[in-house]
Structures are given as C-alpha cells and as structure tokens.
Image: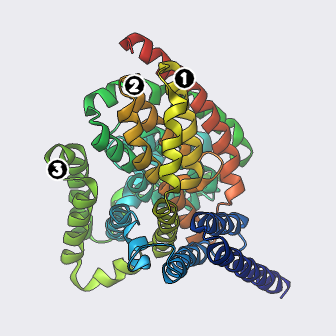
Amino acid sequence: MNATMKQTRWEIIAAIVVLIMIVISIGLVVAYHNVALAIIVVFIGTYVLISTEKVNRTAMALLGMSLAGFIFWVAMEIQILVIEHPFEVLIAEIEWTTIIFIIAMSMIVSVAAASGLFQFIALKIAARSEGNHKKLFITFLVFVSGISLFFDTVSTMLIAAPLTIEICKALEIDFKPFLISEAIVCNFSSIPSLVGAVPNLVIAGQTGLDVGFLFVAFMPLSIILFLVSLPILLRWFSSTFGSTDEHRIDAVFSIDPATMIKDKWDFNISAVAIIILVIGFAIGPGFGLFPPMVAIFVAGFLLLLAHERANEFLNRVGWPTVFFLVGLFGLVGALSITGLIEALGNSFEPIIGDDPAFALVFLTWIPAMLSAFLDNLPVAAVLAPIAVQFAGVSPILPLALVFAVNIGGYIFTPLGSPANMVVIGLSEREHDPISFIEFVKIGTILGLIHLTIGSGYLLLLNALIGG
C-alpha cells in the first residue's frame, strides 16, 4: 500500500511540474514572444522528470513532445511564428528512418527468438565459459564487439541482449552488468563501420567519408578501447560475479543446443534472414540500399511467411521503447525548428579557427557532450556540415565527429544512444530495470577515458597524415 501511495505521490508531483512547465512556457511565448526559451523550458523539464525514474519515461517523452507542439500552435495563433500546421512540421522532424529500423529489427528478433535461434546461439557461446561468470562476461563482450561491425548499435543489442538475458537467467546471474557493458561496448565498437551506427551513415553521407578510410583509421582504436575497457568493467562489476551451483551448470550445458529449436521452419528462415541482414548491411550502402530499407524488407518477408503468427510477433515488439524514442526525437526536433541546434552549430565556427589540433579536440569533446543530452543522431546531422566546412583545417575532422557522437552515446546519460534505451527497455520487460544512475556511473567513467585516448589517437593520426 505504501509503495502505491509513494508512486501516486510522484505522479502528482510530475503532474504539478508539467503544469508549471506549461504556465512558464506559454507565459514566455505570450508575454515575451520567446518561443525558443519556452521550448528549452519544456525540454529541460521533461528530461529532469525522466531522469528521476519515478515516472513513466515513454509517457513523459510523448507528453513533452505534445507540449512542444502546443507551444508552436500558440505561437502561430498569436502570429509570432509563421508555420502552417505546426504539429505536422514537428512530427516531420522525427527521425522516422531510425524508428522504422528499430521496429523492423524488433520484428526480426521476435521471429528469431520464437524459433529458438537465440537460445541455440546462447548455449553455443555460453558453453565455452563452463559456467565461469567472468569468462561468460568476456565471451559476450567479445561477441558484441564483433557483430557491432556488421549491425547498427540498436540491431546489435536487439540480437545480443535477449540471449544474454536468457543465459543469465538460466545460470541465475544478474544480467544487468552484462547488458550495461554490452551497450557501452557496442557503441564504441561500431565506430570503424559505416553501418555500425546510424550517425556514421549521416556523417559519411554529408562529408563524403570513405568507408575504407573509416575502417582502417578506427579499427586499431576500437581494439585499444576494448582492451582498456575490459579490465575496468571486470573490476567495476566484480562483486556481482558469484558462482553458479554445479548441478545447475551441468543441467544447462548438458542440454543439446539443437533441442532449443522450437520451430524448424522459423529457425531456418530466421537464420537465412540474419545472413541476408549481414550481407545487406555490409554491401547494401554501396548500392544505395541502406540498413532501414534492408531491415524492413526482411522483417516484412518474415511476417509474410509467419502468416497466422504475424500478430503474435508484432505484439512482442518493444513498443514502449519505440514510442519513447518518438517523443525524444520530437523534443529534439522542436529544438531544431526554433533554430537552437543550428545556432549552436554556427557558434562553433569562429571558435574552431584554423588550428587543426584545437579543431580536432573541439570536435571530439563538444559533440560528445552534446550527444549525451540531445541524442547523437541530430548532433551528427547538425555538425557534419561544420566538419565539411573546416575540412581544409584537417582531413581528420569527419573522423573526429564520428568518434565523438558514438562515445557521447553513453556519458552523463544513457539517452544519447537508442541502443542504450533498448537495453533499458528489455530490462524493464524482465521486471528488473537498469537504473539511469547505475548506467551513468560506469558509462561516464569509461566515456571520459575513451575521449581522452581518442583525442590523443586523432592528433597522432592527423600528424601522420600531415593535416
């Protein structure tokens, strides 16, 4: 009863805060004609409430987006903002390709999970650890690091996280340290690959960054970051690594992986689908076939073959995470409509100047900090033209931006990367949620270390190339 009362109390507090946000923001628009500041109030208020973890984050994100739309409507009605159909304009700012990509991958994962494919892979991978928690931890991180080169970060976590949860539950291990570590590893391991993260695609598209150059330049750094991160993660989570009863270990690993196959037809088409995805993500961009298009095609085909079970698989999609990202992208889109993000980008121009060393450090640390709060995708889209503009200062600037937005995905907040939110969403589905603070502590420590190492690496790379 007390827990219910406490939750109700937080809901009342949240409602009061929202009302205050409305009064302040509308007051700023009506009295001072300051739409930008009103949007900032809503943006900050929404983020603060979400960070408390006491209110439903999906509901708060959608509510924040709707408040932003209401502010634009009021501004239009009193004729201080010339936008027809403001809410439609706001909706258009949402990164729908990313949303579609996440939904498509969720569908594919749903079919594959129902077939037993992930359980089959999990037993194959986990068997190498022989029940040793640290070995299992390392095995999963190596697996995540490897597939991050072929899958987008969201896809990676949609594939790796469910099987991690399955094997951890079977061995009675706390899966949260595994998921947090995998999310961080997948973010920095995706840096060398064009398809490793959606921001990579955005930056490469606007700067003309060569795929081969990206891989050769960043693969050594990705390996260095992994080797540095692994001992830190092992030490950080050492207290959670206990021991599993030998009888349970024998019971789990004596199972023939083939017995995990629940439906041979679904298993086979899921395996083929994963292969097609890997091939499509690897070579598709060279032909103009980008990951969202490949993913939605494969997902649609799997649902077609599923026939009567299609609705069952659709119900398993992580809709709370999807709609949370819709609201989050909507809020960032509101900042873009008011010109705040563009103004922020333009303010960098006189600061960068013509010093390549300063430009590299600046375009590493500042975008990383922004990505932590604004999501790395819109930050990448806004700052990519700046990297093009200052290409004469250093040819490494596009690389610095790629590095920055990916590392920024896990410092200060887990909100910077959709992959993090997928992991948090999956933990909530298991009724054992990862707290923001739990993620932020280790994410920020590693992020700052990675930014320091990466800055030195980029400066060395610039010196070798002769920028």
Kind of residue indicated by mark 1: Phe
Kind of residue indicated by mark 2: Ile
Marks 2 and 1, the one that precedes in the sequence: 1
**Real-space Cα separation, disc 2 to disc 1, in angstroms:** 12 Å
Quadrant in which residue 6 is drawn: bottom right
Residue at numbered disc 1: 358
Left or right: 147 as drawn, with respect to 182 = left
* Residue 21: image location, x then y, percent: 69, 75
| Nearer the observer, 304 or 62 | 62
Specify whether residue 139 is in view. no
Residue at numbered disc 3: 288
* Residue 327: image location, x then y, percent: 51, 71
Look at the numbered disc 3 and give the secondary structure of its residue: loop
Marks 1 and 3, the one that precedes in the sequence: 3
Marks 2 and 3, the one that precedes in the sequence: 3
Question: Residue shown at 75%/45% (left/top)?
Answer: 239
Left or right: 410 as drawn, with respect to 390 = right
Question: Residue shown at 39%/15% (left/top)?
Answer: 467
Q: Look at the picture and state if 176 lies above or below 309.
A: above
Mark number displayed over residue 396 = 2
Q: Residue lying furthest bottom in this view?
A: 1
Look at the numbered disc 2 and give the secondary structure of its residue: loop
**Real-space Cα separation, disc 2 to disc 3, in angstroms:** 25 Å
Q: Look at the picture and state if 164 lies above or below 15.
A: above
Kind of residue indicated by mark 3: Gly
Q: Residues within 10 Å of mark 1 (few under 14, many from 20)?
A: some
